[in-house]
Image (cartoon, helix red, strand yellow):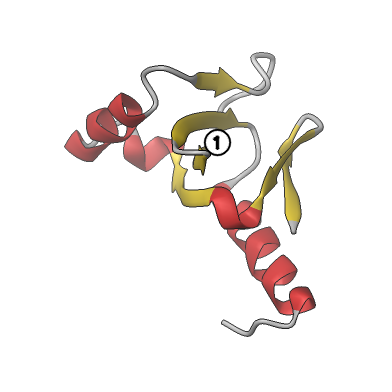
Amino acid sequence: MVISIGENTLVHTEDIVAIFDMDSITIKERGKYIFNLGKEKIVNIDSQNLPRSCVVVCENGENTIYISPVNSITLQKRVADSTIKKGNFL
């Protein structure tokens, strides 16, 4: 299944490694580690709005970090909803 992570950007739920809240990740040491994972590819989906979440995606062995204006809790609910619709239960 795919979910929208903002501004017409879709990702496959099975490719999502993690979803983080931008406020908490940018002030912690692990934030540096997370952003180093996607050094090659960091995509700011919407530069007009405040970044709310960070979505780490691994497609074909390549990490991409999407900076999204959508709240991390909303994205987590979208992933959970897509999993339930697919027939897998959490």
Label 1 CA crowd tier, 10 Å (few <14, some 14–19, many 20+): some
The reply, left or right, for residue 6 in relation to residue 33 is: right
Between 50 and 76, which is closer to the camera in this rendering? 76
Quadrant into which the N terminus falls: bottom right
Q: In this view, does 87 lie above or below 24?
A: below
Task: Identify which amino acid the numbered label 1 is placed on.
Answer: Arg
Q: In this view, does 20 lie above or below 28?
A: below
Quadrant into which the C terminus falls: bottom right
The reply, left or right, for residue 72 in relation to residue 88 is: left
Residue 60 % position (x, y) = 52, 39
Residue at the left extreme of this rendering = 29
Residue 88 % position (x, y) = 66, 82
Between 31 and 14, which is closer to the camera in this rendering? 14
Residue 89 is drawn in which quadrant?
bottom right
Helix, strand or loop status at disc 1: loop
Which residue was labeled with disc 1?
52
Query: Disc count in the image?
Result: 1
Q: Which residue is drawn at 44% across and 38% down?
A: 61
The reply, left or right, for residue 36 in relation to residue 80 is: left
Residue at the front extreme of this rendering = 60
The reply, left or right, for residue 70 in relation to residue 22 is: right
Q: Residue at x 69, y 14 (%)?
A: 48
Residue 34 is drawn in which quadrant?
top left
Residue 72 % position (x, y) = 55, 49
Q: Residue at x 34, y 27 (%)?
A: 35
Residue 57 % position (x, y) = 51, 41
